[in-house]
Amino acid sequence: MRAYPSHRAVVGFAFSGYVALTVLIAVLPAASVQHTRGIQGAPARSALAEEGRAIYLREGCGYCHTQFVRDLPLDRPYGRATVAADYANEAPPLPGTERTGPDLSNVAARQPSDTWHLLHLYNPRAVVPQSVMPGFPWYFEQKAAAAPGDVVVPVPPRFVAQGHVIVARQEARALVAYLLSLRQPEVPK
Amino acid sequence: MLQRRSQDPTLRASSASDSPTVRVTFEYLVCATVWLLVGTAAGLLAALKLNWPDAFTVRWLSFGRVRPIHTNTVFWGWSSMALVGLALYVVARTSRAPLWSPTLSRLALVLWNAAVVAGLLTLSAGVTRGPQEYREWIWPVALLFAAGLVLNGVTAYMTAATRRIPEFYISNWYILGAFCFLATILATAYIPLYQRGLGNVVVQGYFMHTGVGMWFTMLALGIAYYEIPRVLGRPIYSYALGVLGFWTNILFYTLIGAHHFIFSPVPWWLQTAAILFSVGMMVPVWAGGGNLLLTFRDTSGVLQRSYSAPFLLAGIVAYVLVSTQGTLEAFRSTNIYWHFTNVTVGHAHLAMYGFIAFVIWGATYGLVPRLTGSEPDPVLVGIHFWLALVGYGIYVVSISIAGILQGFAWVAGESFIRSVEAAEPMWLWRTAGGVLMVTSHAVFAVNVWAMRPGRALVDASAAPAVEVSP
């Protein structure tokens, strides 16, 4: 006759052991790094760029675009290696796990043109024919004529009905403001 | 052979199972099947969008919204409901006791369905916690799910606690453990106190890793430890290996989440520990997987006759493969070539589909006809098996090649768009595989309906309380 361990012993030990391991490997390390300060002198994001970041989250851009540069030769094109301070004021930080599109940590330095970004957001294939990124036409408006103060996007003719112009809505301008805020500040030595 | 079994005149709803438990299990499986259809339709749409990015340009069907809908629906809708539906039966059966409270489990199912529906609506509306994989649901939605989890955990625990035999069978270790682990994991993921800045990244690594390993894997193994010996008609190869696998799984699996953020600012010791324990994972994987595979030895006869055993065997083979691949992916050297590429997507599907979904299907086909007295058409089960197996084979191979090509393009320092061009033909293959997979799910849905509780069960439930022999 073999002795069977009781359900209390097995479940109790597994549960408490698991909680202990979780505290050890997730909660304590997280707590120990969460107060890393941001980089001194890095410019704060504008209110418009903050609005753009919310749209960036809403549209799931982070599923295909990382903001996580590794200290590896193949990551050189994206900027310097990401440091803890880069994530300090990000809620949530967006390191990402996949690069179906390129890393955006420093995209403003690589591509500083707001017109390019507006075109690219309206339909990526207007600027990169091989791109598989979704367009976001709902953040633009097709009009017969631009009103004063409108941001007109110079969309190639095949992407717009004849005799019309494409105008960026507030959301598109906010998203571009966010993308243009993605410029890695220098890390003080 | 298959035909002969389907005409087996002796098949009846097993008198050993009480009908409320059977009904709860079946209700979970029906809901899970609906979410399988919805979730994989979303997955197929996401795949199509990489082939034809201008198709379905609708705000709430944009790639960035469809992707989390796909992952969350198949995780929390399909896999969780199906596994728990089966697990509740396994706990009751191996305890020789009726389910402690079918009412609580039904309530939990309502809560879970509410969570999945709310998750669908919020995610498609763009209401999300951002791309923090598998914890995108805003907290009220997650709370609905957590409440259901607690109800089911209590029900499962109390069922085992009121068991009528002395043995606390190994399946119950895994299943009751899974409820404790996911409760811990969800709480850790949603409590914000330690998640500012980089703290969030540390928790994200832990969450996305253990969410899969300590919930889906544990439930699937628990079910496998019951169903594989039952289908094969022989005891498990080694009970001791099952126990070893259980404890080492808890120890090693929990500690390796940081391997998703190698070369990141996450503390270096944490990354190194994660890599070390990823190698340690070979112990539970080969102890557990080898144990289950050895149980299959010399059973080719059963494999030919049974339509559930091939699913179970394919599932356990995928478990061993995917876990071994996981260890290889964790090294810093391989990370350079594979991280951020589609290899990750192939890995995820090998795990959640090749392993988890196949174990669910094997257990469903093995158990449910016995419980309800209604069998599906064996030819349709065969069609389901081959469509799913060939479909996901094409999927995993093509998407992994896509990932390897991406990695090579990056390491060669080519312009980024070259990696997109290199992957594109493989993405087309991936979609083709996906079409087969989704088709197989429609066949599965037909089969589930064919297995619905029949007259035999109605009669049984009309009878007085079921006699359960110890």
Image (cartoon, coloured by chain):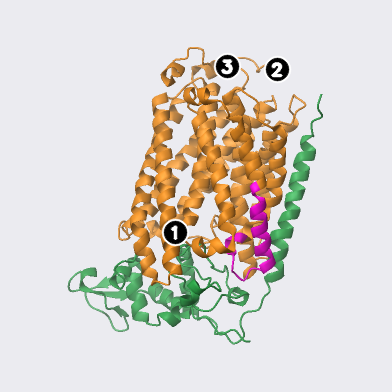
Mark 3–mark 1 distance (CA, rounded to whole Å): 56 Å
Looking at marks 3 and 1 on the same chain, the residue that comes earlier in the sequence is marked by: 1
> Can you tell which of label 1 and label 2 is closer to the viewer?
1
Residue type at numbered disc 1 = Ile
Q: Colour of chain B?
A: orange
Give, as a single range, the part of the protein colored magenta. Answer: B259-282
For mark 2, give the secondary structure: loop
Contact flag, marks 3 and 1 (Cβ < 8 Å): no
Q: Which residue is mark 3?
A: B460
Subunit that carries the residue with mark 3: B
Does the magenta segment cover residue B316? no
Q: Colour of chain A?
A: green
Front residue of this view, candidates B54 and B168: B168
Residue B404, numbered label: 1
Q: Which residue is mark 2?
A: B469
Residue type at numbered disc 3 = Ala
| Quadrant the C terminus of chain A occupies | bottom right
